Image: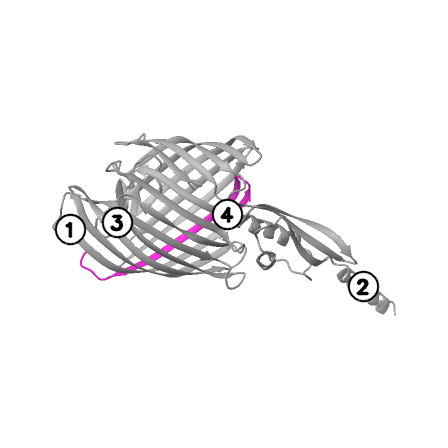
Amino acid sequence: MKKNILLLTFLLIAFYGIAQEKIVYDVKFQGHKKNKVGFLRNYVSVRNGDKLDSLKLDQDVILLKRLAGITHAYYQVFYSHDNLYNIYFNIEENFTLIPNANLWTTTNEQIAYKIGLYDYNFLGRNIAFGGFYQNNGFDSYGINLRAPNLFTRNFGVAINHQNWTSQEPLYFDDGSANYKYSNTSFEVLALYQINFKHRLQFGINVFKEEYDYINGITSDAIPQNLSLDKQMLKFVYEYDGLNYYYQYVEGYKNTLYLQYVTTENNFQDNFLIGWSDFLYFERVGEKGNWANRFRFGVASNNASPFAPFSVDNNLNIRGVGNIIDRGTASLVLNSEYRYTLYEKDWFILQGNGFIDTGTWRNPGGSFSDFINSENFRIYPGVGLRFIHKRIFNAIFRIDYGYGVTKNSSSGIVFGIGQYF
């Protein structure tokens, strides 16, 4: 009898405990104007009727802050009735309709410009849509659509078309030559979010490359005019453990890129290329941020002037110059300390000191090329960031890099957004 009474008492206590679990009654959003409530409700993981879980809510806040249309977010929990609670997500929106304008001088002293317009939160549903026009002596344009949540919360698509023309150097044993390079491409990618931290992209890019000789040395091995039809299979895996607080970033992220390019011609074989970007960020005190990027890339080691990895100001080493060399493998480490010098309302002035280092494997060479002094580059430098707190990616940067290794140069690099 006593055993039955104890068992009944235990069951009543367990049932009462379950009945008194805190349950989500409703999910609400505050502070939104452009962002659509329907999209936001589907984007976060918490649902009406779920058990109240602070870990899940913390993850949803991080996800919201990763959206281009949101600069900051936090949640509040309010009692409704019985054991039911309302969840309020409070958001601060970014302005996401961003014009783009750049002006620079090319290597042959021509004035070049690029203009564009992108909405990174098109229709209030985290869709990036826009395009650009560029003239650097040649006409180029691109149109891009990226909708990662188009079909479901986890599944979307990206569609890109680009017609790009520029003057590109090709490097031979005895020197280099300048070619007019054209690339016309169509790309379709499937975008899939596995969970909170893991994402996939995969698809195909069909493109045509054309090379037309301008000046420099010539080679019997490479024609002065060349047209190549190619297809690229593309795969990207992303682990994202970053957390944002306005201009500050913490955590780490790794992105793996794999591409397989097929072509039918006598000057290039099919080749595989892959690289990994590992990012690590750490808050230092109240105003400091230590940022790091380590990139390792390797491709099929063809002895060809068309090597896929380039040494370039805007890609890997600030101050080195525009496409000064090419390789079939690369090691690059970028490390910088960012410090907020001034902050008031929407404006932030950030300074940084950096060191960019890198080395390359020559086309057809070996990995011992990594320690060849002719390939190794070290560029320390300083820079400034002018940041608008409430406009997506509204960061104007200027960096000065000074080479300290053999045959180094120096230079100023301008750009939009953080370098990495």
The residue where tag 4 is placed is 96
Q: Which mark is residue 224?
A: 1
Which is more foreground, mark 3 or mark 2? 3
Q: Are marks 4 and 2 in contact (CB under 8 Å)?
A: no
What secondary structure is marked by label 4?
A: loop
The residue where tag 3 is placed is 307
The residue that appears at 32% across and 57% down in the rendered structure is: 185
Q: Is residue 206 left or right of residue 45?
A: left
The kind of residue on which mark 1 rests is Gln
- Residue 404 location, quadrant: top left
Which is more foreground, mark 4 or mark 3? 4
- Residue 397 location, quadrant: top left
Q: CA distance from mark 1 to mark 4?
A: 44 Å
Q: From which residue to which does the magenta span run?
A: 240-268
Q: CA distance from mark 4 to mark 3?
A: 36 Å
Question: Which circle's residue, 1 or 3, is located before the other in the chain?
Answer: 1
Q: Is residue 34 left or right of residue 143?
A: right
Question: Which circle's residue, 1 or 2, is located before the other in the chain?
Answer: 2
Q: Which mark is residue 10?
A: 2
Where the N terminus falls, by quadrant? Answer: bottom right
Q: In terms of secondary structure, what is the magenta stretch mainly?
A: strand
Q: Are marks 4 and 3 in contact (CB under 8 Å)?
A: no
Q: Is residue 244 rendered magenta in the image?
A: yes
Q: CA distance from mark 3 to mark 2?
A: 72 Å
Q: CA distance from mark 1 to mark 2?
A: 87 Å
The kind of residue on which mark 3 rests is Ala
The kind of residue on which mark 2 rests is Phe
The residue that appears at 24% across and 45% down in the rendered structure is: 168
Q: Which percent across, then down, holds residue 375?
A: 27, 39
Could you tell me if residue 368 is visible in this image?
no
